[in-house]
Image: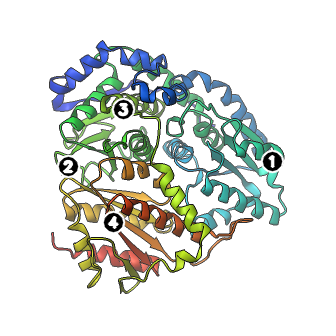
Amino acid sequence: MTQPQPQDTSLTVDLGDSGAGGAVGELIAKLVADRVASKLAGQDSTLWGPAAESEASIRLSWTTLHKTSRPLIGEIDALREELRGEGVDRVVLAGMGGSSLAPEVITATEGVPLTVLDTTDPGQVGDALAGDLDRTVIVVSSKSGGTVETDSHRRIFAKAFTEAGIDPGRRIVVVTDPGSPLAELAESEGYRKLFLADPNVGGRYSALTAFGLVPAGLAGADVARLLDQAAAAAGELSVDSDGNPGLRLAAALGAAHEAGAEKVVLANSDTGSPETLTGFGDWAEQLIAESTGKQGTGLLPVVVEGPDSPGFADADSDATTVAIGPRVSTADLAVRGPLGGQFLLWEYATAVIGRLLGINPFDQPDVEAAKNAARSLLDEPESLGGEQEPSTVDGPVEVFASAGVSGDGGLGDVLQEFLRTVPEHGYVAVQAYLDRLDDASATLLRGELAKRCGVQVTFGWGPRFLHSTGQYHKGGHQNGVFLQITGAADNDIEVPDRPYTLATLQLAQALGDGAVLREHGRPVLRLHLTDRAAGLAEIVRALQELQT
């Protein structure tokens, strides 16, 4: 276990030029007068109005997790020591959304290894299987207990363990809600350990529950220190004061949204520092998008590579730029503090933003649509192959055009035509249904597009973004256009006792989400790579040759 180091646990929200004056100051004063901070800390479910009260009443236990999660520490430490005593020190996590993003940030920030499977890409899953199974334990995390991606990973690893002569029951650890199908399965199959999470915490607020702490702790992260940091933050965040960092952050983002800044651009400003919160933007992205993106409103999080990246350094009036770390000249806001404190800060602020926007920050009414569409395609797998013929083929790239894009000409012409469909103050979402390790060069597409199209550009790995920004895409401001990237799978993987492979599931998820986006009237362009490396290079080349 990593040894604790003395550190500053305070939170700082630097409002920059806006200070606490004007609209921001008025909002802070109103929140203080309404005692929003203390009511939230006291789990008052009336804060978001009568329509949200029922949901909110069973979603507010995250405010006390710095206390209630303490008993987990001993359980995690004991299991880790048991496993290491058996020579098992490689931890694989199968989970989606809140079940994977928090553990990934925790372990990456602390520099301890964790293999995260939040994908249906057969190449990425195959690489995880190729690791040393003799040393491997898999943590299967699902709040509902029925997440299709996670269930597929469990089945695949159970079969691999069996074929390697390893008892899968000894190598599978489960994190889920009480009474879920996965909890019942863990009991009936005799899995190594079943951790039951607090059912009164939603997935995206679950960083400090068993979902965040178990895989991170088993991998070697100091989860006790994380809870200490959150405990220190809880005191600051529960006070009805104009110095409350949660109220300051919520008011700044809420006032900016009211003025037309419907996007929040996040960049790590202390990369390379020992205090760097590695990957924090990816976790915050899910929290903000899924909590606020509904009823035609919300904040679209845009995670960029750094404060000098396209989209941050040149952000327009439709975006608020936030540095995670020290203040930089290109940032409107700067937020500093240790990871445990930042988890709680952003949760508080996001819940308060929900009140300011007049929406329920604890539901996700549009997430199921894409899942249902994918299930329908899996029920009729023949429809996947005959979905349509490509409108054009440019080398290793097959083009499947959408409304508003003819698909005529070469790849560059198609991309130019596609970008003309972006409305003023709209955004482009790049959705890469690929291997985020072997196909990591796909991330270059965000910056290349942002340099050329004059609007904010997001990047998401499919299907993991379906559990985060997928809610905003369908429920938030309807001004996005969507560039899907899919790719041929060289080595597919069967899902045991299921009538589909991982590649089939991955394609169904892409096509299903695309169909739902089109139903919302949004342009969708799919580029299918018959050769992934060559195809990505061809797309980057075409973008670099675009006329701006």
Q: Secondary structure at mark 2?
A: loop
Q: CA distance from mark 1 to mark 2?
A: 52 Å
Q: Is residue 280 above or below residue 537?
A: above
First-in-chain label (4 vs 3): 3
> Which label sits in the foreground, 1 or 3?
3
From the top left corner, tell me how far across and down residue 259 is, in percent.
18, 37
Query: What colour scheme has been applied to the protein in the rendered image?
Result: rainbow
Q: Residue at x 40, y 20 (%)?
A: 237
Label pair 4/3, CB-CB below 8 angstroms: no
Residue at 18% x, 51% y: name it: 314
Asked whether residue 240 is in view, the answer is: yes
Q: Secondary structure at mark 1?
A: loop
Judge from the rendering whether residue 101 lies leftward or rightward of residue 122; answer left or right.
left
Q: Residues within 10 Å of mark 1 (few under 14, many from 20)?
A: few
**Is residue 140 toward the left or the right of residue 287 in the image?**
right
Q: Earlier in the sequence, mark 1 or mark 3?
A: 1
Q: Does label 1 or label 2 sit earlier along the sequence?
A: 1
Comes first in the chain, label 4 or label 2: 2
Q: Which residue is mark 4?
A: 445
Helix, strand, or loop for circle 3? helix
Task: Inspect the image, locate mark 1, and give the three-letter code of the amino acid beneath it.
Answer: Glu
The foreground one among 5 and 542 is 542
Residue 203 as seen in the image, left or right of residue 407: right
- The amino acid on which the numbered mark 3 sits, given as a three-letter code, is Gly
Q: CA distance from mark 1 to mark 4?
A: 44 Å
Rendered image: mark on residue 354: 3
Measured in 3D between alpha carbons, the distance from the residue under mark 4 to the one under mark 2, in whole angstroms, is 18 Å
Name the residue beneath numbered marker 1: 86
Query: How many angstroms separate mark 3 from mark 2 (CA)?
Result: 24 Å
Q: Which residue is mark 2?
A: 315
